[in-house]
Image (tube, rainbow, N blue to C red):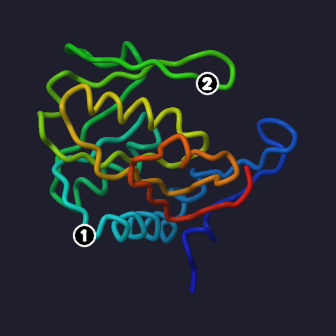
Amino acid sequence: MKTVADSVISIPDFPKEGIIFRDVTSVVNDADGLKLAVDGLMEKLEGIDFDVIAGAEARGFLFGMPLAYLLHKPFVLIRKKGKLPRDTVSEAYDLEYGTAEIEIHKDAIKPGQKVVLVDDLIATGGTMAAAAHLVEKLGGEVVCLLFLMELAGLNGRERLAGYRVESVICYEGK
């Protein structure tokens, strides 16, 4: 029986030597892989009480939006700085070389709302830690950080300690 992991193409030495790049486009380019991915994410949400799904730009949109649609929940976009048209709050975070900043509309999360954050991949956890801080700045409660893939060797779960972290596929390396 096919699994979602069967749809992931792994590219060695990209973007640099020693890295194995896990290509999410190969999942969404395969109808069976996409269905298995969304179904696998849905399973991880079973029993979790939440009000809103939010996704990190851009691959979090790919998986967060169908979940929101299927579960009849609102979807909130978390975008790179300068891309949202209304009043926003922002959070800066460190990258391997430099920093980045993400934003969310100030009215996107209401105080007390329970939020699931979705992205395609957890590596070091920096983007989702920043996204969780944005939700909390607005008075929301992060009840789950949900990922299609996890690179356990980069210790993203440690950075996200204190949050419930779920992933459909876990790769032991980097």
Quarter residue 1 falls in: bottom right
Residues marked 2 and 1 touching at CB (< 8 Å): no
Label disc, if present, on residue 107 of the rendered structure: none
Q: Closest to the observer: 25 or 149?
A: 149
Label 2 – label 1 distance at C-alpha: 34 Å
Left or right: 35 as drawn, with respect to 155: left
Query: Where 42 sits versus 112, above or below?
Result: below
Residue 11 lies, in percent from the top left, at 77, 51
Label 1: element kind? loop
Q: Crowding near pointer 1: few (<14 within 10 Å), some, many (20+)?
A: few
Q: Closest to the observer: 84 or 124?
A: 124
The outermost residue toward the bottom is: 1
- Residue wearing tag 2: 95
Q: At label 1, which amino acid type do we have?
A: Gly
Q: Crowding near pointer 2: few (<14 within 10 Å), some, many (20+)?
A: few
Left or right: 86 as drawn, with respect to 46: left
Residue 105 lies, in percent from the top left, at 23, 23
Q: Closest to the observer: 106 or 58?
A: 106
Q: At label 2, which amino acid type do we have?
A: Leu
Residue 123 lies, in percent from the top left, at 60, 44
- Residue wearing tag 1: 47
